[in-house]
Amino acid sequence: MMSVIVTILVLGLCVLGISIKIWAKKDGEFSGTCASQNPYLNKNGENCSFCGKNPSEFNQCDGKS
């Protein structure tokens, strides 16, 4: 029973932390949502599945293609 309470408490703290981060950010957006900006995650140079840009087109990912 104690582990269930601890798990719920930890998950609640995580949700609270994420909601504070969203509230504190301008327009509630996370920065760097395109994983293809990161060369370690996109080793093949594939286009972003979020906005459709290729890695050489990134100045800022705004979610628009």
Image (tube, rainbow, N blue to C red):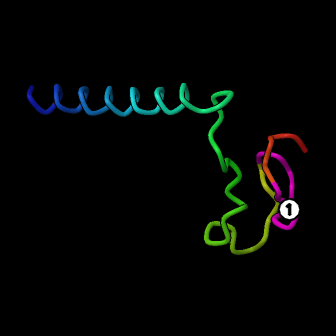
The residue at the far left in this view is 2
From this viewpoint, which residue is outermost toward the right?
65
**Residue annotated with mark 1:** 54
Figure label count: 1
Horizontal and vertical percent for residue 62? 80, 42
Decide: is 1 above or below 60: above
- Residue name at image x 65 percent, y 34 percent: 29
The answer to whether residue 58 is magenta is yes
**Could you tell whether 14 is left or right of 54 in the image?**
left
Q: Position of residue 26 (x, y in %)?
A: 65, 31
The segment highlighted magenta reads 50-59
Residue at image coords 61%, 71% = 40
Q: Is residue 12 above or below residue 32?
A: above
The chief SS type of the magenta part is loop
- 9 part of magenta stretch: no
Q: Is residue 23 left or right of residue 50?
A: left
Residue at 65% in and 45% down: 31
Q: Is residue 24 left or right of residue 41?
A: left
Residue in the image at 13% along x and 33% along y:
3
The C terminus sits in image quarter: top right
Give the structural element (helix, strand or loop) at label 1. Answer: loop
Where does the N terminus fall, quadrant-wise? top left
Crowding around mark 1 (Cα neighbors within 10 Å: few <14, some 14 to 19, many 20+) is some
In the picture, measured across the screen, residue 7 lies left or right of residue 43, that is left
Q: Position of residue 15 (x, y in %)?
A: 40, 28
Q: The residue under label 1 is which amino acid type?
A: Asn
* Residue 38, percent from left and from top: 66, 65
